[in-house]
Image (tube, helix red, strand yellow):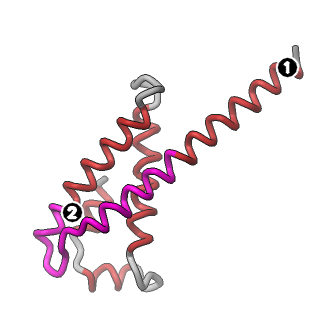
Amino acid sequence: MVIIFFLSSRTGNELHKAFPFLSDFNIGHIIAYFILAFLVYYALNKTVQSKTVDRWNITICLLYGITDEYHQSFVPTRNPDIGDLMRDMVGVVIAILVINYMKRYIKKIAKADKVKYS
């Protein structure tokens, strides 16, 4: 969250200087919130019921995305954008899908090993 806040505090020119290989920062939103969702999942996984982890993850990332867009309204050359928020949420949803796929895959492997060694 600190890194996202720091990058959101930079002007467009500063971001282009820092990331000259990106001509469009739309993918940056997806990547940043993909990583954020993984980290939020890791933080919540042991403390929140497994049935609600995804909902909490989406809620936390969405609220942070909203506050991030609001924060950008105070940065010169930056504006809050609902499209950016939507791209943030795309990153979150992709992360949650990957996490759930990984959990099912690991369970499947564990079950196969249990049967194999029984």
Q: Quadrant of residue 99?
A: top right
**Frontmost residue, 100 versus 106:** 100
The x, y position of residue 106, in whole percent, is 69, 34
The amino acid beneath tag 1 is Val
**Frontmost residue, 81 versus 23:** 81
**In the figure, is residue 48 to the left or right of 117?**
left
**In the figure, is residue 85 to the left or right of 111?**
left
Q: In terms of secondary structure, where does tag 1 sit? A: helix
The 10 Å Cα crowd at callout 1, few under 14, some 14 to 19, many 20 or more, is few
Q: Give the residue number, with chain letter if any, for mark 1.
A: 115
The amino acid beneath tag 2 is Glu
**Frontmost residue, 58 versus 109:** 58
The residue that appears at 30% across and 68% down in the rendered structure is 83
The residue that appears at 40% across and 51% down in the rendered structure is 36
In the image, the segment drawn in magenta is 69-96
Q: Give the residue number, with chain letter if any, for mark 2.
A: 69
